[in-house]
Amino acid sequence: MADQEETIKGGKEIALLAAAGLALFANQAEDEVELDADAATKFVEGADAKFAALEAEAALLTGKDNKKARTEKSKEASALKKTDEYIDAMNVMKGKPGKNGNFCKVKKAAVAEVAAAPTEEEEKKDDKDKKDKPKKAQDSAGISKAERDELEKLKNDIISRKKELKEGGMSGGQMNKDAEICTWVKRMNDLKEKENPGGIAAQKEEKKGGSKKKLSAESEAEKKRLENEIEEYKAKLKTEFGYTAKDIKTDPDLLEMISKLAACK
């Protein structure tokens, strides 16, 4: 009996020493930087495409009368490659972390704490908790700060590009078929789906006449606000941008509002 107690005591001491060793190792570990090369590449491709478009527009502004406008276009194009996002993206594409923290995540090294070896009763309780606890999903929803910033920039770029195309005489349908806009819209939808999994599916379900749930007062107010916002935006597309009814239905910003409204319902 005494030998058995000594064995148990020795086992606990070994466990404590092992925990101390792990803690020392963890304290010496360095933070890990995870680079998002795919997002960086897509950002650079989009910026380069816009740069080329601005340079082409500047080249068309010939003569002394267009010197000022030509210079402005060239400055606007040059500024695209001087932003923190662009500089970071180029570094990330080379396998280096950006100085401004874009397109990368820093994973803090875990620091282990020295804890006393669990008693037999605590081990039994821990095993029971593990069995009772539901299994968590392996992939959590949501997007990083860099991806959220990218999403906002894509929205602004799409709006700016549409204004440029509108001034050039394009119709709403032609705008939506523009190669650059199509690329941005696809990337924007990918980020939206990652941020809110099932949001696009919810929108399709809403179009099919999915089941309706009773809304709270707060949800009802949000629903009304979104409905008003959608109607105002439709009117703006028609009056300011000259969209047809078909063009309005495929506008990405409008589809986003409808998706939010579907989620609210």
Image (cartoon, helix red, strand yellow):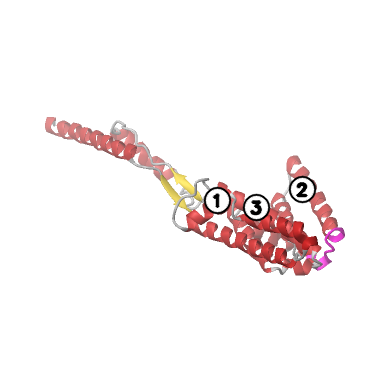
Q: Which residues are magenta?
A: 238-247
In the shown orientation, is residue 257 left or right of residue 85? right
Say whether disc 2 or disc 1 marks the residue closer to the N-terminus. 1
Q: For the residues marked 3 and 1, what is the alpha-carbon distance in whole angstroms?
A: 21 Å
Amino acid carrying label 3: it is Lys
The structure residue drawn at horizontal position 57% and vertical position 59%, both measured from the top left corner, is 44
Kindly identify which residue carries mark 3: 153
Furthest residue toward left: 3
Where does residue 167 sit, x and y in percent of width and height?
A: 80, 62
Residue 9 belongs to magenta span: no
Q: Nearer the viewer, mark 2 or mark 3?
A: 3
Residue 143 shows up from this direction: no
In the shown orientation, is residue 81 left or right of residue 158? left
Q: Against 246, is 19 above or below?
A: above
Kindly identify which residue carries mark 2: 223
Q: For the residues marked 2 and 1, what is the alpha-carbon distance in whole angstroms?
A: 24 Å
Residue 246 belongs to magenta span: yes
Q: How would you rate the neighbour count of disc 3 (Cα within 10 Å): few for under 14, some for 14-19, many for 20 or more?
A: some
| Disc number for residue 141 | 1
Say whether disc 2 or disc 3 marks the residue closer to the N-terminus. 3
Q: How would you rate the neighbour count of disc 2 (Cα within 10 Å): few for under 14, some for 14-19, many for 20 or more?
A: some
Secondary structure beneath label 1: loop
Amino acid carrying label 2: it is Lys
